[in-house]
Amino acid sequence: MTYHGPGQLVAYPILDLREWKRDVGAYVRAVEQTIIDTLADYGIEAGRIPKLTGVWVGERKIAAIGVHISRWVTSHGLALNVDTDLSYFQYIVPCGLTKPVTSMAQLGVRATLEEVSRNLAAHFGRVFDCEMLYEAPVLAAEREN
């Protein structure tokens, strides 16, 4: 189980891996690298923990990754805690792990979802060697108007 909510950057890339690499592990590692590179833009040293999916700052998870691949086409994706209210995580065991979570804001970084999503998209394009057409995220409050 995971949590998606305000202050969290959720991205669901849809790629045909036949056009990239037919390797699920390489795809997940590349998504992790995209997030690691994005966080480095903000001075956050993030990385991997062997045998665990996601991106970590020390022992705290800052980004979750969950993919679905059918006929080599990806769906689902990632959730990066930018300015997320972390109290919601106390009600679940995120991704089946009892390790704590963190956010960019908790680490002292003040950045907007739009700014972080633009940087993430640029890193995604570089890591996956594809052209990115950026469209600003639509916030739930904006959809209601």
Image (cartoon, rainbow, N blue to C red):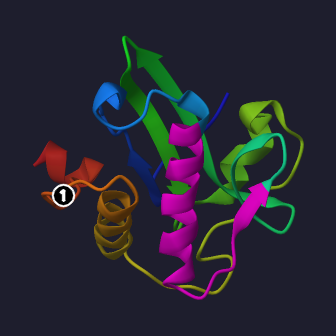
The answer to whether 117 is drawn above or below residue 31 in the figure is below
| Magenta span main SS | helix
Q: Secondary structure at mark 1?
A: loop
Which sits in the foreground, 97 or 40? 40
In the orientation shown, which residue stands out farthest toward the top? 71
Give the residues in magenta.
26-48
- Residue drawn at (58%, 53%) of the image: 32
- Residue 145 as seen in the image, left or right of residue 73: left
Point 59% across, 74% down: residue: 104
| Total numbered labels placed on residues in the image | 1
Q: Is residue 1 above or below residue 38?
A: above
- Res 38 visible: yes
Q: Could you tell whether 128 is left or right of 82 in the image?
A: left
Residue 46 placement (x, y as % from top left):
69, 70
Callout 1: 10 Å neighbours few (<14), some, many (20+)? some
Quadrant location of the N terminus?
top right
Vertical order, 79 against 47 (above or below): above
Q: Nearer the viewer, residue 123 or 12?
A: 123
Residue 135 position in % (x across, y down) = 14, 58
Residue at left offset 74%, top offset 37%: 94
Q: Amino acid at mark 1?
A: Met
Q: Is residue 3 magenta?
A: no
**In terms of image quadrants, where is residue 53?**
top right
Location of residue 43 in the rendering, given as x and y in whole percent from the top left corner: 60, 88
**Residue at left offset 30%, top offset 68%:** 122
Q: Which residue is mark 1?
A: 132
Tell me residue 97's x, y (percent): 84, 38
